[in-house]
Amino acid sequence: MKDLAQRFSQNPLLSPAELKPSTEGLEITCLLNPGVFRYEDKTWLIVRVAERPAQKDGIISFPILTPTGTEIIEIALNDPELNASDPRVINYKGTDYLTTLSHLRLLCSDDGIRFYEPEGYRHLAGEGMLQSFGIEDCRVTCIDNKYYLTFTAVSGNGVGVAMRTTTDWKDFEDHGMILPPHNKDCAIFEETIGGKYYALHRPSSVDIGGNYIWLAESPDGIHWGNHKCLARTRPDSWDSARIGAGAAPIRTERGWLEIYHGANKQHQYCLGALLLDLDDPSKVLARTEDPIMIPSTPYELSGFFGNVVFTNGHVLSPDGDTLTMYYGAADEFVCGADFSIKEILSLLK
Ligand code: MAN
């Protein structure tokens, strides 16, 4: 097994304490899983910012969005009807809640390493009853100068994919939920193929099937159909429990290269790669046997949820080979790493 990531020596690039909470009374618990794009000669991250109140002894408390504002729910940790065994999601009286509330925040950089919050750009927060537990893990795709933001919308109704579009990062058009629960990890291709838009997504089937990567097509980039299952989890492998797309696939001579995440039953999240046919992306040409990146540094092994590397954003450098990937480490920090596309392709036989 070879880890191909050249991690930035400056990692972690962003930690929770470096940004200001969105709301009085909340703390930033995690900064993670940024979408990435180039705009006005800068590299931009749209970072998932997960917040909750400072935790008091014996009580778990977390925010949710309601029509009248942010509400804090408090539950005694010894309440027999509480199951808080997962740091990310709890169950209380038969209902699931997230332990943090996420919004999306824009940061930019001239060098791709030092990121700051520019003035004049607002936070993107959950809106409406399908986003009352927040919005997460945004992928950004640019087609004809229009940016398509696909992100996870969470509420008591389930976890689905919502979309907003923009041309200037100031005004956004809301397209609502484009893929209903349970679905996440949606990445739109940055080119149309044969006049159609394509997207990868990850529905979850509760009974037969599992957490697999699917392909969908669309006449307009908004309405999706003709879904096809592209890749499944592999038993006894590093990607045995769930897999999901990273950012938009990268066009290479040999096919569309997709970096994806895979988790095993122990919730270790690694990255691997898929190669899809250029003309017909429903054809999987190859898949890496082993991960190309494995959590291994202290900031990847321990944090809010340790043993995790998760990506949904990258930029390709002008040399055509260096892929600068931004990723969430241990569900708490934003980090960067370079990959050589040639090197990844050499594993896709
Ligand atoms: C999983 C994890 C969490 C996330 C929820 C909802 O539990 O990925 O980080 O908040 O799903 O998307």
Image (tube, rainbow, N blue to C red):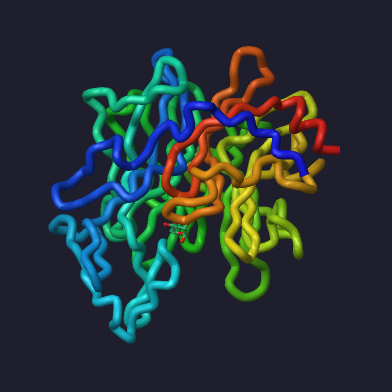
Drawn side of residue 53 relative to residue 47, left or right = left
Q: Residue furthest bottom?
A: 80
Q: Residue furthest right?
A: 349
Percent position of residue 90, x then y: 38, 70
Percent position of residue 177, x then y: 41, 52
Percent position of residue 29, x then y: 32, 50
Percent position of residue 115, x then y: 37, 25
Q: Residue at x 69, y 25 (%)?
A: 340
Can residue 216 be seen? no
Of residue 107 and residue 53, the one placed in the foreground of this image is: 53
Can residue 267 be seen? yes
Quadrant of the displayed image that contains ligand 1? bottom left
Which quadrant of the view contains residue 17?
Answer: top left
Of residue 343 and residue 294, the one placed in the foreground of this image is: 294
Is residue 197 shown above or below 324?
Answer: below
Drawn side of residue 184 relative to residue 238, left or right = left
Is residue 20 shown above or below 54?
Answer: above
Q: Residue furthest front?
A: 298
Q: Residue at x 65, y 28 (%)?
A: 339
Of residue 53 and residue 103, the one placed in the foreground of this image is: 53
Quarter that holds the C terminus: top right
Quarter that holds the N terminus: top right
Which quadrant of the view contains residue 67?
Answer: bottom left
Which quadrant of the view contains residue 94?
Answer: bottom left
Q: Residue at x 45, y 49 (%)?
A: 331
Q: Residue at x 71, y 58 (%)?
A: 232
